[in-house]
Image (spheres, rainbow, N blue to C red):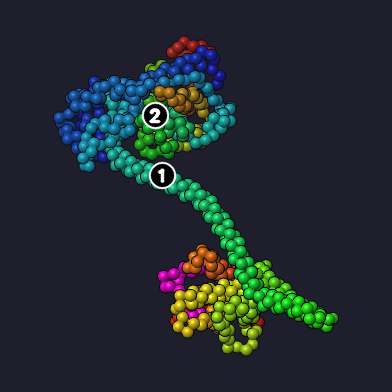
Amino acid sequence: MCSETFKVLDNVPMGIFVLQDDLTVMFWNRCIENWTNIPREQIVGTNIGEHYSHLREPRYLSRIKPIFEGGPPTIFSAQLHKHIIPSWGLNKQLRIQHTTVTAMPATEGNGFFALFVIADVSDLTIRIQEYKTLRDQALEEIKMRKEAEMKLKEFNQNLEAIVVQEIEKRRRHEELLIQQSKMAAMGEMIGAIAHQWRTPLTGLGLLFDDIKDAGEYGELDQFYLNRVVEESGQLIGFMSKTIDDFRNFYRTNKEKVRFNAKEAVEETLSLFSAQLKNNNIAVQILCAHNTNDIFCVYGYPNEFKQVILNVVNNSRDAIIERVEKSEFSNGLGQINIEISEQDDRINVSIKDNGGGIKADILNRVFEPYFTTKDAQKGTGIGLYMSKIIIENNMDGKLYAKNIDDGCVFVIELNRCKD
Amino acid sequence: MVLNTFQVDALTELINIGVGRAAGVLNEMLMAHVSLQVPSIRLITRSNIKQELEGLFGKSASIVRMGFRGPFSGIASLIFPPDSAANLIGLLIGDLNMEADMDAIKIGTLTEVGNIVLNGVMGSLANILMKHVEYSIPIYQDSNVHNFITPYDTTEQPIILLARTRFRIETQLIEGDIILVFEVGSFESLISELNSSLDITQ
């Protein structure tokens, strides 16, 4: 009876079976036959509870019973009832099933049968699970990325503070260096003034002796006095000018100006030549051009002069040290300053025969506080300041290299075109 | 149509019985304490249907609906705000970190809950008539409730029976609305049957 009535359900690709009110199986379609490996002939006419005892439990029975009275359909969803008719799928896992039970009028017109239609939602469930896993991973990654971004942001904020601190530290350090540099310059100035004053002071001393003698010998007339006053005035004027010259030399320029590099070198040497001469060091300026105009540069003239002085002083100290160690064959120190121009550049090369710089420290001579001299002689900031003046303030270059018997410091500056 | 106190009480009682039955089924099935309450019922009639619905269901919702046909016809629906739906599923399967978006498996779960509740209510109503009502298979949809109800009736506005339900699972409270939309004439048939079955006179 049932086979004929329900035969059409064999063509449906879902597990379908029909129960009557006493839970006897009326129909078992081909699909569910394949799923369960229970042939229709074996199960039809038997109680479903004999095969699947959980269907006798109240939680199922209470929802199936109303169907036999023509009640509304009942749904057993896949999440709450995964395997209503447990059966193994091709993937060796139990099929996940979504079941709908509906009432259908019994053939004899008495009561209703329950039609179970089971959809295999294993693939769908697996796909959703995979999708959820992927999504969870993506969300986790996003979360981790956000956390990393937050940390990075925090780090950057801290970094900013560290950088600000470091900049401030460096600024203070440079201020200190500048201060030390000024003190060193002052020392240099006093030394230089002492050298420059020695001759006029001796002159003045001699004049006083002469006045004394003139007094004793009755030669102290008006003419004599006028001459002595004039000579003293000249000497005192020279001394005064010396102070002015040095003060100008060490005054810091506030603004960049156009100046002549060659003249600046000459002025520097004129101030300090007495000292150099005193140490038996010959200084020579070499320049192929007669006209000075082509050596115009743009920058801070006094700072530039200090650079020349720093480098020359280094050469001087190296030569003196060499003399003290008796390393000189001919005993004569030599500093040659060569000024040349090439294209848009002006080169000032200061060469000496002080023995050169050891190769392993050649790269370090411009570092702050790096010195090979005695603590009393060198502070280690002269060349560092020189590099800052030339490279940072005047867009030029300052470097050193060894040559035969000495070294050369090269200053490269941009030339003013007109 | 205006209902008298007895009729309102009778309808409330029937729906309470249905909801109580549904709660029993859910308890049994989930082995967790589920309580369902129907504090009150409301009848939304033809004249004020539009503004009532706009006020009640402006936003989208998760809806399980089941059609019925027989001595009285219409659509029975269980409606949850989206968050409530996700929370409910989360509680049912023991995952409280449930995302609000629905997938086919979650839809299946929610459909089953809707099915249990609606079966309880419809079974309770049908029982008093002692007549057979045909039901369609429950389906799920995400929709604006207003859009869902109004296209149903093209000629005249239907009568809507609204019962606000509260699900309480363990300590969590989830709100949902049971809505019965009756075709023209059907609600009158139901009330008439109600009158005769319970011997209530207008």
Q: CA distance from mark 2 to mark 1?
A: 22 Å
| SS label for mark 1 | helix
**Does the magenta run of residues contain B189?**
no
Q: How many residues crowd around disc 2 within 10 Å: few (fewer than 14), some, or many (20 or more)?
A: some
Amino acid on which disc 2 is placed: Leu
Q: Judge by depth and name the residue closer to the eye, A144 or A239.
A: A239
- Asked if badge 2 and badge 1 are on a common chain, one would say no
Determine the chain carrying the residue at label 1. Answer: A
Q: Nearer the viewer, residue B168 or A282?
A: A282
| Residue type, mark 1 in image | Leu
Percent from the top left, x then y, of residue A62?
31, 21
- Asked if B89 appears above or below A379 in the picture, the reply is above
The structure residue drawn at horizontal position 53% and vertical position 67%, both measured from the top left corner, is A378
Considering depth in this image, is A270 or A16 the residue closer to the camera?
A270
A94 in relation to A349, above or below: above
The spot of residue B66 in percent (x, y) is 41, 30
Mark count:
2
Q: Position of residue A334 (x, y in %)?
A: 52, 82
Q: Residue at x 57, y 30 (%)?
A: B55
Quadrant holding the N terminus of chain A: top left
Looking at the rendering, the stretch of residues picked out in magenta corresponds to A352-367
Q: Is residue A286 left or right of residue A221?
A: left
Residue at coordinates 53% horizontally, 65% vertically from top-left?
Answer: A376
Coordinates of residue A249 in the picture (x, y in percent): 66, 72
Element assignment for label 2: helix
Mark identifier at residue A139: 1
* Tag 2 residue: B91
Q: Is residue A366 magenta?
A: yes
Residue at 49 percent across and 80 percent down: it is A353
